[in-house]
Amino acid sequence: MGEKWQEKQHHREQTVKEAVEAADRIILDGSDGSVEETDYLTAEVARKFMEKALHPFSRDLLSKDIKED
């Protein structure tokens, strides 16, 4: 694959890495410091991101189902 693709991929990987690091900082700042609280906040952030990521698929599937009825 081309150099441009590699640059795009590297940029994407850096963006994801920076987003995870930012989320970690925010979670640690908001946590009471216990492992349980930190794990809970991490899991909730991950759940929200999963919901956000899957939302378009759910919307598209619902739209398809409505059109078929």
Image (spheres, rainbow, N blue to C red):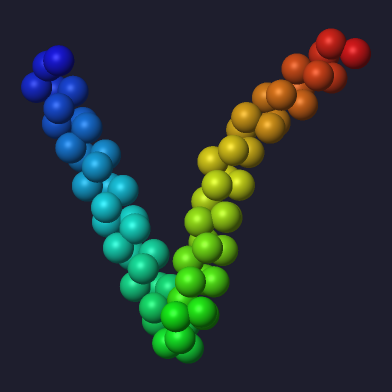
As drawn, the residue found furthest toward the left would be: 3
Query: Is 8 rendered above or below residue 66?
Result: below
The image shows residue 45 at horizontal and vertical percentages of 52, 61
Query: Is 64 rendered above or below residue 44?
Result: above
Q: Residue at x 51, y 80 (%)?
A: 37
Asked whether, in this view, residue 49 is left or right of residue 18, the answer is right
Q: Residue at x 68, y 24 (%)?
A: 60
7 or 1: nearer the viewer: 1
Q: Is residue 47 visible?
A: yes
Query: Is 19 rendered above or below residue 12?
Result: below
Q: Residue at x 27, y 48 (%)?
A: 15
As drawn, the residue found furthest toward the front would be: 35
The image shows residue 63 at horizontal and vertical percentages of 76, 22
Q: Quadrant of the C terminus?
A: top right
**Snapshot quadrant of residue 44:** bottom right
Q: Quadrant of the N terminus?
A: top left
The image shows residue 11 at horizontal and vertical percentages of 21, 40
Asked whether, in this view, residue 43 is left or right of residue 3, the answer is right
Q: Residue at x 18, y 37 (%)?
A: 10
Q: Is residue 30 visible?
A: no
